[in-house]
Image (tube, rainbow, N blue to C red):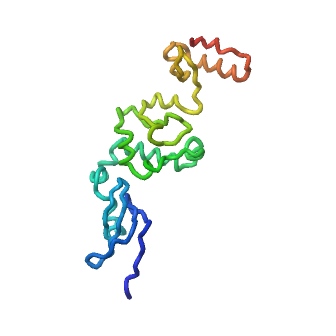
Amino acid sequence: MPWKFKDHTGIVYGELTVRAHAGKRNGGHQWECLCNCGAVTIVAACHLVSGHTRSCGAGFHAVKKNAVTRMPEYWAWCGMRARCKSKDPVYGGRGIKVCERWQNSFNDFIADMGSRPSKRHTIERIDVNGDYEPGNCKWIPKTDQSENTRRTHWILLRGEKMSVAKACRISGVNYWNVMYHINKAKRDPQESFDRARLS
């Protein structure tokens, strides 16, 4: 019984997306594939199906997989995509997405973001209501990230917009005392923020 031809067009194998049939070689079918890094390569069907070939072999793909997965930037990339695929009301559940360029390629992500400045840094969106994309992301210390959420209270201190937590650290004022007055003012619009004495 003759072997049935299988069309692999459009199927994704690892970092490769099959684009078109590229003829036969040594009795086996070859396929033109587009790698996530942007390179085009020809791969035998048997190598795609078996998992022998998962990328074009260029750039970061030339590094052994276990070396790439030890990179903290790689795990930041994985975590970013996982958050947006989830139903978490802070991320995927409210429509926050990863741009197509970063969703499909760790290479492009690292090219745009660069390496983390230190172990204390994590990826952060500048506009918390915006997507993960070039121009809206930066590496910041984890302590600063915890202050940049939709629940963060922002104030002006000496003409600079900052979180209440940061303003309290600068001014030497008790954070919980300030939050007491802020929450009280929310309940009673006539309550003045002057008691916080942050100016």
Residue 176 coordinates in the image, percent (x, y):
59, 19
Find the residue positioned furthest to the left. Answer: 26
Residue 59 coordinates in the image, percent (x, y):
29, 51
Q: Please identify the quarter of the rendering in which residue 130 is found.
A: top right
Q: Left or right: where does residue 111 sit relative to residue 166?
A: left
Quarter that holds the C terminus = top right
Give the residue displayed 71% in from the left and 16% down from the top.
191
Q: Please identify the quarter of the rendering in which residue 194 is found.
A: top right
Q: Left or right: where does residue 165 sit relative to residue 47?
A: right
Give the residue displayed 45% in from the left and 45% down from the top.
79
Residue 56 coordinates in the image, percent (x, y):
31, 59
Q: Please identify the quarter of the rendering in which residue 46 is found.
A: bottom left
Residue 125 coordinates in the image, percent (x, y):
49, 36
Q: Left or right: where does residue 170 sit relative to residue 190?
A: left
Quarter that holds the N terminus = bottom left
Q: Nearer the viewer, residue 196 or 7?
A: 7
For the image, the number of numbered tags is 0
Find the residue positioned furthest to the bottom. Answer: 1
